[in-house]
C-alpha cells in the first residue's frame, strides 16, 4: 500500500510518516528530502535561485516518479504539493491520501519559531504570519479535502496520529 500524507506545513507529515512507516514496516519517503537529494540544493536555495514555479516543476516530476514505483511506502508531501498542477489527482490515483488537518491558530503556533526554515514564511514579519497562513490554508483546503482520509489532529501527538491512521486502514 502507498500512503501519502498531505497537509499544511507544520502539520507533522514527516514526523508522523516516519512513525507510521515503522509501524507498518514500510519504507518512509519525504518528497522534500528527495528533491534536495536530486537537486543538491536546499528547498530554500531552490526557491531563492530558481523561484517557486521551477521548484513546483521539480516537485511534480519527482512526485510522479515516486508514485509510479511498484513498491509500497509512506510518503510525506510538501504542504503545497497537492495544490499544483493535477497533483492531488495523481496522488489519489496512485496512493491513499491522508490529510492531517490542523486549525490556522495551531499551525501558526507550530511555525512561529521556524520561519527561517520555511521559504514561504521567511520574508514575513511575525505579525503577518497568522493572516498569511489563514489565507494560504483557505486556498489549499479544497485540494487537501480531496484526500480519501481526513483526520483532525488537534491535540494529538504523532504516535496517536499514526495509530489513528492505522485504525482507518483496518476499517477500509
Image (tube, rainbow, N blue to C red):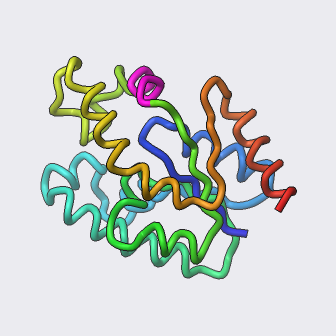
Residue under the image location 29 percent in, 29 percent down: 115
Left or right: residue 135 compared with residue 11: left
Q: What's drawn in magenta, residue-wise?
A: 104-110
Residue under the image location 30 percent in, 64 percent down: 39
Q: Where is residue 91 in the image (x, y as percent from the top left)?
A: 52, 69
Q: Where is residue 109 in the image (x, y as percent from the top left)?
A: 42, 20
Image position of 156 with respect to 167: above or below: above
Left or right: residue 143 compared with residue 42: right
Image position of 101 with respect to 112: above or below: below
The prevailing secondary structure element of the residues shown in magenta is helix
Q: Position of residue 111 (x, y in %)?
A: 39, 27
Image position of 131 with respect to 35: above or below: above
Q: Name the quadrant containing residue 92.
A: bottom right
Residue 109 counted in the magenta span: yes
Residue 152 counted in the magenta span: no
Residue under the image location 70 percent in, 43 percent down: 19
Amino acid at each position: 500500500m502507498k500512503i501519502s500524507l498531505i497537509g499544511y506545513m507544520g502539520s507533522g507529515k514527516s514526523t508522523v510518516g516516519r512513525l507510521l512507516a515503522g509501524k507498518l514496516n514500510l519504507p518512509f519517503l519525504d518528497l522534500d528530502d528527495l528533491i534536495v537529494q536530486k537537486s543538491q540544493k536546499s528547498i530554500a536555495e531552490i526557491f531563492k535561485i530558481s523561484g517557486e514555479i521551477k521548484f513546483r516543476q521539480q516537485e511534480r516530476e519527482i512526485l510522479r516518479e515516486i508514485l509510479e514505483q511498484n513498491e509500497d511506502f509512506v510518503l510525506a508531501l510538501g504542504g503545497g504539493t497537492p495544490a499544483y498542477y493535477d497533483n492531488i489527482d495523481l496522488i489519489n490515483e496512485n496512493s491513499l491520501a491522508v490529510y492531517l488537518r490542523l486549525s490556522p491558530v495551531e499551525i501558526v503556533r507550530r511555525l512561529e519559531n521556524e520561519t527561517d526554515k520555511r521559504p514561504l514564511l521567511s520574508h514575513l514579519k511575525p505579525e503577518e504570519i497568522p493572516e498569511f497562513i489563514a489565507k494560504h490554508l483557505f486556498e489549499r483546503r479544497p485540494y487537501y479535502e480531496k484526500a480519501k482520509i481526513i483526520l483532525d489532529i488537534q491535540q494529538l501527538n504523532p504516535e496517536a496520529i499514526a495509530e489513528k491512521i492505522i485504525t482507518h486502514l483496518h476499517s477500509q
